[in-house]
């Protein structure tokens, strides 16, 4: 028998993010920019950033190959890992990517995961472009919650940020999710200085009008082009000051869940809520209870892990559930204390957010 997934810092893992594909139909400039120009979006536009504080532009080309199909875990393999992890105390499972709705038959996987006894919350993060046609099947298969990524309410700015003319599709997806009774419907917006920080109040008004849980997320150094600059991060504190200047905020008590990544507020007299996720300026690693499984079967104990455990050789080599459970426990025991963004020895991981699973 195996006990819970506990690390050497006393943290117990409850949350597993499962990436089902490294592919994506969007090209968000903070994640998987399509061109050098998109990756270098800030250089010509913002004088203050022409001489960045911490240049980290790599020579690695932006274009990269998708993982071959044979390296991607099958639904059966994913379900097996999740079942073992849940037996070890995981309660929340989030299906992500890449763009999870590009994985054919993903509703079948949702169906299998929702039947695992002990999965208390089954969620998905999507860019929303393909949500419409699959929404009802996902709901029926047992998906509890859905988070959409939407960084802008302006069609042109949305296109600048995601590389695609996709705003209308995402708005449709959000509407449909509400109609189907997903609640709360979450919306994530990565805020980048000079790109969409001016849209923060509009995004809040939209969330209130549509009864959404909006999350503003600090830009993290996980973009494939390594164009991240500290100066582009709009800190959680700045966002909060801006919100306080425009809205009457009432804090939501999150003391019952210290692993919660967002600080949250309701708006006086309004519906929905607003949260700020500030991993760069206010790291919350001390309470982290998350693990990640990449589409190609690598276990990551931190978004910023520099090494990862390949589960494929065990999954495909006849290992028992007990062998896999023991490996999960060993890896979790060595989970990093926290990320090192801002420290001299910080190294950006090889994989971009799209290849890890956010
Ligand atoms: N494609 C789906 C989507 O965009 O919702 C799921 C995968 S995406 C990698 C998951 C989340 O990571 C999205 O909400 C996205 O905005 C966020 N993300 C991607 N790159 C990021 C970065 N460099 N910093 C902060 N958040 C990022
Ligand atoms: Fe694709 Fe999501 Fe990354 Fe955007 S954030 S490029 S939608 S994986």
Image (spheres, rainbow, N blue to C red):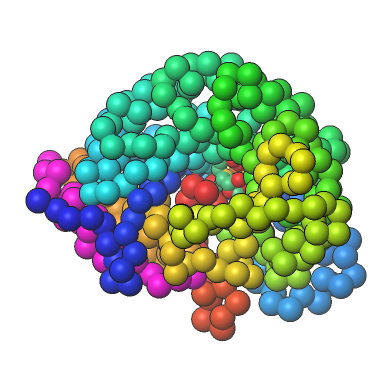
Q: Residue 12 appears at what percent x and percent y? A: 32, 59
Q: Which residues are magenta?
A: 318-339
User: Which of the 4 image quarters holds residue 192?
Assistant: bottom right
Magenta stretch contains residue 336: yes
- Residue 224 shows up from this direction: no
Classify residue 4 as left or right of residue 176. Answer: left
Q: Residue 40 appears at what percent x and percent y? A: 76, 59
Magenta stretch contains residue 104: no
User: Which of the 4 image quarters holds residue 282?
Assistant: bottom right
Classify residue 311 as left or right of residue 272. Answer: left
Asked if residue 106 is positioned above or below residue 41 in the image, the reply reads above
Q: How many marks?
A: 0
Asked if residue 90 is positioned above or below residue 289 in the image, the reply reads above
Is 207 in front, or is 300? 207
- Residue 341 shows up from this direction: yes
Q: Extreme front residue here? A: 269
Q: Residue 140 appears at what percent x and percent y? A: 45, 17
Residue for point 36% across, 37% down:
120
Residue for point 66% across, 55% down:
251
Asked if residue 331 is positioned above or below residue 118 in the image, the reply reads below
User: Which of the 4 image quarters holds residue 184?
Assistant: top right
Is 176 in front, or is 258? 258
Q: Residue 189 appears at what percent x and percent y? A: 69, 47
Residue for point 27% across, 43% down:
86
| Quadrant of the rendered image holding ligand 2 | top right
Residue for point 69% across, 77% down:
54
């Amino acid at each position: 028998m195996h006990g819970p997934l506990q690390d050497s810092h006393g943290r117990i893992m409850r949350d597993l993010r499962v990436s089902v594909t490294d592919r994506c139909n969007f090209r968000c400039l903070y994640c998987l920019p399509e061109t050098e120009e998109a990756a270098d979006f800030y250089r010509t536009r913002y004088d203050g950033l022409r001489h960045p504080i911490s240049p980290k532009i790599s020579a690695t080309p932006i274009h990269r190959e998708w993982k071959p199909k044979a390296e991607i875990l099958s639904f059966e393999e994913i379900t097996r890992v999740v079942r073992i992890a849940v037996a070890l105390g995981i309660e929340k499972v989030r299906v992500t990517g890449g763009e999870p709705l590009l994985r054919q038959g993903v509703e079948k996987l949702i169906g299998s995961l929702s039947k695992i006894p002990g999965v208390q919350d089954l969620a998905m993060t999507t860019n929303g472009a393909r949500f419409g046609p699959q929404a009802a099947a996902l709901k029926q298969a047992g998906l509890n919650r859905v988070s959409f990524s939407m960084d802008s309410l302006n069609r042109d700015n949305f296109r600048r940020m995601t590389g695609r003319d996709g705003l209308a599709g995402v708005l449709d997806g959000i509407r449909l999710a509400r109609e189907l009774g997903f609640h709360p419907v979450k919306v994530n917006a990565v805020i980048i200085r000079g790109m969409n920080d001016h849209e923060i109040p509009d995004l809040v008004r939209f969330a209130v009008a549509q009864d959404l849980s909006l999350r503003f997320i600090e830009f993290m150094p996980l973009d494939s082009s390594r164009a991240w600059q500290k100066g582009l991060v709009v800190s959680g504190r700045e966002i909060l000051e801006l919100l306080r200047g425009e809205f009457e905020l009432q804090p939501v008590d999150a003391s019952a869940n210290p692993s919660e990544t967002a600080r949250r507020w309701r708006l006086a007299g309004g519906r929905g809520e607003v949260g700020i996720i500030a991993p760069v300026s206010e790291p919350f690693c001390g309470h982290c209870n998350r693990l990640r499984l990449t589409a190609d079967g690598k276990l990551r104990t931190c978004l910023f892990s520099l090494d990862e455990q390949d589960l494929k050789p065990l999954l495909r080599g006849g290992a028992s559930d007990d062998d896999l459970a023991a490996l999960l426990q060993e890896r979790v025991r060595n989970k990093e204390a926290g990320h090192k963004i801002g420290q001299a020895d910080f190294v950006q991981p090889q994989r971009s957010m799209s290849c890890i699973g956010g």
